[in-house]
Image (cartoon, rainbow, N blue to C red):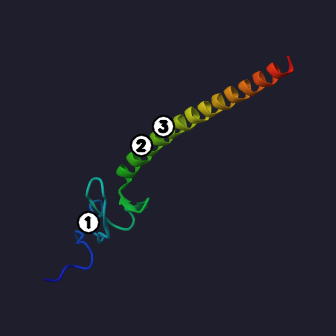
Amino acid sequence: MRLPLRPTVPHRCFNHPDRPALAICVDCRKPLCQGCSTLWEGIHCCVDCLAKRRATAGERSGGLRLVFLTVATLALLAVATILRSWIGAALAEVL
């Protein structure tokens, strides 16, 4: 039994029936011609699905920013606590 070398793609673009389809949108599964397909992060997307992916990518980067700020704040608090204990110990030795 021989397997095809590449996945089968419908023959015509969803938006342009006169153009051959070269890819399928990974989200909505519409066949796309070269003009309608955008390769983003290694996958083919149509214009509508690409807009949705970019919107959710922006939301994810906002969440990552919050995580980074939280970790940075905790690190600064730890450094401040260590410095405070060292200064307290040094003052106790002097007095």
Q: Which numbered disc, 2 or 3, marks the residue that appears first in the sequence?
A: 2
Disc 1 is placed on an element classified as loop
Disc 2 is placed on an element classified as helix
The quadrant of the rendering that contains the N terminus is bottom left
Please name whichever residue, 11 or 95, is drawn nearer the observer in this view of the structure: 95
Measured in 3D between alpha carbons, the distance from the residue under mark 3 to the one under mark 1, in whole angstroms, is 41 Å
Measured in 3D between alpha carbons, the distance from the residue under mark 1 to the one under mark 2, in whole angstroms, is 30 Å
Residue underneath mark 2: 56
Please name whichever residue, 40 or 90, is drawn nearer the observer in this view of the structure: 90
Residue underneath mark 3: 63
Q: Is residue 14 left or right of residue 60?
A: left
Please state which amino acid type lies under the numbered disc 2.
Thr
Residue 22: x %, y % from top left: 32, 70
Q: Is residue 40 left or right of residue 67?
A: left
Q: Is residue 48 left or right of residue 29?
A: right
**Which dot marks residue 61?**
none
Question: Which residue is outermost to the top?
Answer: 95
- Residue 86's place in the image compared with 68, above or below, is above
Residue 34: x %, y % from top left: 38, 68
Residue underneath mark 1: 17
Residue 46: x %, y % from top left: 35, 56
Q: Which dot, 3 or 1, sits closer to the camera?
A: 3
Q: Quadrant of residue 36?
A: bottom left
Residue at the image position 75 percent from the left and 28 percent from the top: 86
